[in-house]
Image: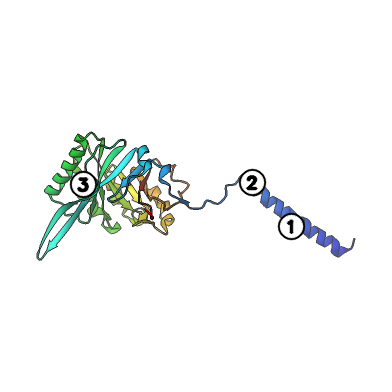
């Protein structure tokens, strides 16, 4: 065999060795994880918003977050008034699941009358035979205003009877760019935060870039997902002692 042929054989042998080595290294290794579609059937906690039709998954519900209205500030000429606009389903005896009453807020200028309206609603649901966990406030507090939001929530907590919990929704940006001290204040006030990974009816495009910062949270938190949206959990999420699972925002089928 000539010298050139021997060199070619050596090269071919080394190439085969490299391929075999690469194959052996991949054995037992997981395939790359791709984002999955959020299926409500895989979960047991749900938001029920206004206009959303009942779904079979509610038969397995453990926690229900039910919209009851909006707290808004109405301006007329030189005057303004903060009021509650009722929304969502009426008071009813739910078949199963612990119930949170949700109020969407666009203002934090709440009056004692506003709080009394919300308290009356909580008690009404309770007297109807429901296991009412408490009140959830859905307010998109800007990250730079978390201290002011904490002050507001402290007042709500003081007005809320001890048998009702206080929960809030939170933005993904809070954990990445929020004031750490302000976030720490929240754990002394609220019982849980649900971090929303969607906006409108779509998953936030770059949601996964915010997820590593969830490790900063030292307060019970859940992750809010949109039904049929996208989700790929970070590997360290389930190891967090503060993680309490997922809440799915139900939505109607597009052809319904």
Q: Which mark is residue 15?
A: 1
Most extreme residue toward the top is: 129
Q: Mark 3 or 1 closer to N-term?
A: 1
Give the left or right position of residue 201, taking residue 102 as reference.
Answer: right
Q: Mark 2 or 3 closer to N-term?
A: 2
Query: In the figure, residue 121 lies in which quadrant?
Result: top left
Q: x and y percent of residue 60 in the render? A: 37, 37
Residue at image point 14% right, 44% down: 116
Residue nearest the observer in this picture, 41 or 173: 41
Q: x and y percent of residue 194 in the render? A: 33, 47
Disc 1 element: helix
- The crowding category of the residue bearing disc 2, from other C-alpha atoms within 10 Å (few below 14, some 14 to 19, many at least 20), is few
Q: Which mark is residue 123?
A: none
Q: x and y percent of residue 181 in the render? A: 30, 51
Most extreme residue toward the front is: 256
Q: What residue did someone put label 2 on?
A: 27
What's the CA distance linking mark 3 and mark 1? 67 Å
Q: Quadrant of the N terminus?
A: bottom right
Q: What residue did someone put label 3 on?
A: 154
- The crowding category of the residue bearing disc 1, from other C-alpha atoms within 10 Å (few below 14, some 14 to 19, many at least 20), is few
């Amino acid at each position: 065999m000539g010298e050139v042929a021997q060199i070619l054989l050596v090269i071919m042998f080394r190439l085969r060795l490299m391929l075999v080595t690469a194959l052996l290294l991949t054995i037992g290794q997981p395939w790359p994880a791709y984002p999955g579609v959020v299926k409500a059937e895989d979960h047991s906690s749900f938001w029920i918003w206004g206009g959303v039709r009942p779904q079979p998954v509610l038969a397995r519900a453990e926690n229900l977050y039910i919209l009851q209205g909006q707290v808004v500030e109405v301006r007329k000429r030189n005057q303004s008034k903060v009021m509650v606009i009722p929304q969502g389903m009426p008071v009813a005896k739910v078949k199963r699941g612990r119930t949170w009453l949700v109020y969407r807020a666009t203002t934090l200028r709440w009056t004692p009358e506003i709080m009394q309206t919300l308290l009356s609603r909580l008690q009404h649901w309770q007297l109807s035979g429901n296991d009412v966990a408490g009140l959830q406030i859905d307010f998109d507090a800007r990250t730079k205003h978390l201290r002011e939001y904490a002050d507001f929530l402290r007042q709500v907590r003081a007005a809320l009877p001890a048998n009702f919990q206080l929960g809030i929704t939170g933005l993904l940006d809070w954990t990445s760019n929020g004031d750490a001290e302000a976030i720490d204040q929240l754990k002394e006030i609220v019982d849980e935060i649900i971090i929303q990974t969607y906006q409108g009816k779509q998953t936030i495009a770059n949601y996964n870039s915010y997820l590593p910062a969830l490790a900063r949270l030292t307060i019970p938190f859940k992750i809010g997902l949109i039904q049929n949206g996208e989700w790929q959990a970070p590997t360290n999420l389930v190891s967090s002692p503060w993680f309490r699972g997922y809440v799915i925002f139900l939505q109607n089928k597009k052809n319904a």
